[in-house]
Amino acid sequence: MAERTFTIEGTLSALLEGKKYSTIKDILVTMNPSDVAAVFEDMEEDRLPLLFRLLPKEEAAETFVEMDPELQELLIRGFSDSELREVIDELYVDDAVDIVEEMPANVVRRILSQADPEMRKQINEILRYPENSAGSIMTTEYVSLRPAMTVGESITRIRRTGVDKETIYTCYVTKDRNLIGMVTVKDLLLAQDDDTLVSDIMDTNVISVNTNADQEEVAQMLSKYNFLALPVVDSDNRMVGIITFDDAMDVIEEETTEDIEIMAGITPSDKTYLRSTPIDLFAHRIPWLLLLMVSATFTGMIITSFESALSQLVVLTAFIPMLMDTGGNSGSQSSVTVIRAISLNELEFSDLAVVIWKEIRTAVLCGCALAAACFAKVMLVDRLLLGNTDVTVIVAGVVCATMALTILVAKVVGCTLPMLAKKLGFDPAVMASPFITTIVDALSLLIYFGIANAILF
Amino acid sequence: MAERTFTIEGTLSALLEGKKYSTIKDILVTMNPSDVAAVFEDMEEDRLPLLFRLLPKEEAAETFVEMDPELQELLIRGFSDSELREVIDELYVDDAVDIVEEMPANVVRRILSQADPEMRKQINEILRYPENSAGSIMTTEYVSLRPAMTVGESITRIRRTGVDKETIYTCYVTKDRNLIGMVTVKDLLLAQDDDTLVSDIMDTNVISVNTNADQEEVAQMLSKYNFLALPVVDSDNRMVGIITFDDAMDVIEEETTEDIEIMAGITPSDKTYLRSTPIDLFAHRIPWLLLLMVSATFTGMIITSFESALSQLVVLTAFIPMLMDTGGNSGSQSSVTVIRAISLNELEFSDLAVVIWKEIRTAVLCGCALAAACFAKVMLVDRLLLGNTDVTVIVAGVVCATMALTILVAKVVGCTLPMLAKKLGFDPAVMASPFITTIVDALSLLIYFGIANAILF
């Protein structure tokens, strides 16, 4: 089968060469803005301004939002004031804030000077909220209704003001700026009578979040309740904005990546892998590597103190990697399971006893099964197949007893540390494989040499 | 500060004792169905049927959907036929399918016998799609419009049929059952004129997925494009259903948990941690532990073959854990980063050369920094502080050279294996810490003894 060499980027380049601008326009309008953004990012940078100008106004703004900050900055620097104003006019406030947060000061000044006064005020308001708070990711463009409005009046209001709102499907009922209820467009459309009052059909049981709530918590709530949007209120219960499901999905993706990175001993980064330079990667990876290397001093010390025993029976050394790895793997199975359950809000600190008891029983099962398999493997493979006569039944017994005990210790440590970390206000994800491995390594060596000393020497 | 001992479960129990049913009712209607489900799961099982009957019809069905399969089964077994029929009538088809999939055969027969014929037909249709496919998670209840309808007629149709639809906000335009466009309620409401034709305002550029598409891919698309819903078509482009954003969020959560479990050497499970018995946990953890234990035979063999060298210079043994752990940590940093980038569709196999080159440069930086730090640590801590005179400058040099080289090898192996796995159709997540650690352990020992042999003996 012939390899396809067609790429949309190649076609666009060729059309640009041939100045076939209207053909390019026709192609771009058939594409979704996030796809256009992805294609633009793969094009040569000096062609971008021209390509971008071929997009219809609304699609241009939507594409702009989806692009990388570097390219956004490049485009803004190339825009005339009126072009910049046109893009900003089409942006939702929360998207404008996201862009402003990534730009250098002089670009920010230009953006704010081209935004209309109302938008400038709203951008500045949102910028005042702390990073990762509900306030910092909300948008101020929502539909608000009054309790005394009728269904008919509400629909008219949505038709008149809805075009600039991020979602029209959930409308919030406020009185003196206080959030008192919500009503969906579905409720409005399905209402039997246009003269029904909003106060008669609204849901007064509104779940809202405070501006200072953590963005991860907010995202989890949206996901749990399957809401399209969640209202954000200030400390006086005055409605200030909404957070929509698509922002929640982005937050969840971002926070999960952060968890996974921390679990692998990487300090989290905002950049995608392909946009990270080796220096970036180095900077995010070296702290944990250094810390863990230094903490391995303890394992070295343990081995050194048993040096004379080891030189008498060097075969014991051969089992060190297997025992350490099995301990590390058992421990990280428990810690990672518990970390994930904590971040999905399935576990709380009060479950600690339940968790430890569950892990102890699991460890006994795993320990017995693995010790038995290990005994068989050591006797069959190491002694018979590889003919290592130093591997006696007693040595095999010491190795297997160590294994069973190490698994027990590893699982208890692995499940306890993340829950303690959470309780003490640290990120539980820190207590994953690399950290657990280092602790369990030292413990498994102590158990190993302890048992060996007691039985063999 | 006094500890609060109030729980909503306690209050409900007390009210049940006192037969204050209308008070309970008043409390329950103020709560969101997912909260009601969470509270019910913490109540004594024999009180559930009574509590459940106190919920209003619609809220009862929504609560039922949010409950664990075990409790759903318990409730169904207690329902009369007419109670069962009432709950099923209120369910969306996709939720009904989710429930049916978890129930034993005799319960399924009862559910199907109580569902109305149209719903039974739809449930059976969805059940025929393979697990984890778009078809298996879609719902067949969407709003379809004809291109020749006017905006006014469309709104009337939505008002008439919308109450049973999972979402009314995105409507799909079909002709001879073929999907030809889509129109949102926002478009309809904001249209200037009620006589505008749907065909004039519809978006003909509809992104759809095939019934056989993988659910993870579908969820990523919904997240990428920020859609409320995505239409599902069969192989003849006939529209058969929709997948909504809330299902996509559930799929993403589920698939991420699965990835994280696999990365920690656990075969994935559908049960939450607290609902898993030690036997369940054992069954999902032992396969990888066994496999990794057996594969540690190689590290044992490598050490055995260098036994004579080790017995001459036992101090070399003391650095084995540090070298193995640093190698394992470096390798998993790279593999986990690449695995996450693959699952977010940021990396493809064609990026392999770019990735390897980036990792090599990162490894050189990490390797040099870590080797330098290691040299200082070994000379200061192990030689001077701990007074181990066996630790000469040459030994320290061997250890540090091994460390730098191991990091290089670990990072290249760590980034390559997940990409190869993806290319060969395996799950890249398998190539995370436990697997990489085992490979890197063996390689780091070979490098260590190779360098030691060349320089020291």
Image (tube, coloured by chain):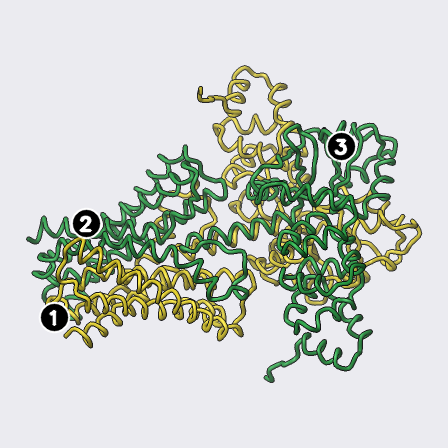
Chain colours: A green, B yellow
Please tell me how crowded label 1 is: few (under 14), some (14-19), or many (20+) other residues with Cα within 10 Å: few
Look at the numbered disc 1 and give the secondary structure of its residue.
Answer: helix
Seen in the image, is B186 located left or right of residue B270?
right
Q: Which amino acid does label 2 sit on?
A: Leu
Name the residue at 33% across, 50% down. Answer: A436
Q: Which chain carries label 3?
A: A
Q: Give B268 or B22, whichever is nearer the viewer.
A: B268
Q: Which residue is label 1 attached to?
A: B308
- Residue B257: % across, % down: 48, 51
**Other-residue count near label 2 (Cα within 10 Å), few / some / many at <14 / 14–19 / ≥20:** some
In the rendered structure, the answer to whether residue A314 lies left or right of residue A29 reads: left
Chain where mark 2 sits: A
Do the residues marked 1 and 3 share a common chain? no
Q: Earlier in the sequence, mark 3 or mark 2?
A: 3
Residue at position x 56%, y 36% in the image: B76
Is label 1 in contact with label 3 (beta carbons under 8 Å)? no
Is B323 drawn above or below residue B126 in the view shown? below
Q: How crowded is mark 3: few (under 14 residues within 10 Å), some or many (20 or more)?
A: many
Reading the image, the residue beneath label 3 is A173
The amino acid type found where label 1 is placed reads Ser
Q: Is residue B111 left or right of residue B455?
A: right
- Which element type, helix, strand or loop, lies under badge 3? strand
Secondary element type, mark 2: helix
Q: x, y (%) of residue B220?
A: 60, 58
Query: What is the C-alpha distance between the residues marked 2 and 1?
Result: 24 Å
Q: Which residue is drawn at the image coordinates 60% and 19% (left, top)?
A: B21
Residue reaching furthest top?
A: B18
**Mark 2 highlights which residue?**
A446
Do we see residue B228 in this rendering? no
